[in-house]
Amino acid sequence: MLKRIIKVLLVLSLFILFIPTYNKYKLDMKVDEVILSKDSNITSIYEGYIYIPKYNYKNLIKKGDRAIDENYVSMHKLSSSIGEGKNIILSGHNNRYVFHKLYSIRVGDEIIISDFRHDFRYIVNEKRIVDVSDSSIFNDENRLTLITCTDDTQKRLVVICIEK
């Protein structure tokens, strides 16, 4: 009887560990599928994608002024378009699918964003925690600004990158 209980617990624990990995795998496959797609409708849904080589992290950038999606990076409503030469502002949740790696990123790390036609390379220049009401991060400088939540609902982690 004890062996049977142990087997059931082992199977359940493997199942619980496998589900998040499988969800991440499905998201990675979708990102790669969209990036490699030649479908012109893709650009009506996604602005482009972000790639952080140090972590082999890729994710799609959703277009428009929608609420932040649990699985994708969102273009902030005050952002300029990719390649426009102004402040590109990307926001996303601090979860395993989106921006949890921003806490580990270091000054000097490379970040690439693409509009599916051209890649734009940026170097992390600064990391800081700001108040939710801090609007200084929304200026018109030529840079990439990444924003994610913190454990404090009144603070945000901001990563500022300059074009390489």
Image (cartoon, rainbow, N blue to C red):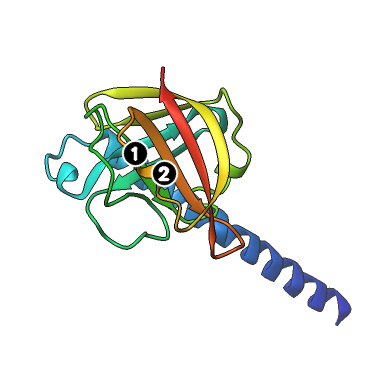
Mark 1 Cα-neighbour bin, 10 Å: few <14, some 14–19, many ≥20:
some
Q: Nearer the viewer, residue 81 or 139?
A: 139
For label 1, the residue is 139
The quarter of the rendered structure image containing the N terminus is bottom right
Outermost residue on the right side: it is: 2
In the image, what residue occupies the spot 63% across and 39% down? 104
The quarter of the rendered structure image containing the C terminus is top left
In the image, what residue occupies the spot 42% across and 24% down? 162
Q: In the image, is 30 to the left or to the right of 19?
A: left
Q: Position of residue 120 (x, y in %)?
A: 33, 23
Three-letter code, disc 2: Ser
The disc label shown at residue 107, or none: none
Relative to 125, residue 90 above or below = below
In the image, what residue occupies the spot 17% across and 34% down? 38
Q: In the image, is 16 to the left or to the right of 140?
A: right
Instruction: Say which quarter of the image contains residue 69.
Output: bottom left
Asked if the residues shown at circle 1 and circle 2 are in contact, with their CB atoms under 8 angstroms apart, the answer is yes
Q: Nearer the viewer, residue 135 or 106?
A: 135
Q: Position of residue 35 (x, y in %)?
A: 29, 36
Q: Position of residue 51 (x, y in %)?
A: 43, 33
Q: Position of residue 150 (x, y in %)?
A: 58, 57
Three-letter code, disc 1: Asn
Outermost residue on the bottom side: it is: 1
Mark 2 Cα-neighbour bin, 10 Å: few <14, some 14–19, many ≥20:
few
Query: Under tag 1, what secondary structure?
Result: loop
The disc label shown at residue 136, or none: 2
Relative to 106, residue 152 above or below = below
Query: Under tag 2, what secondary structure?
Result: helix
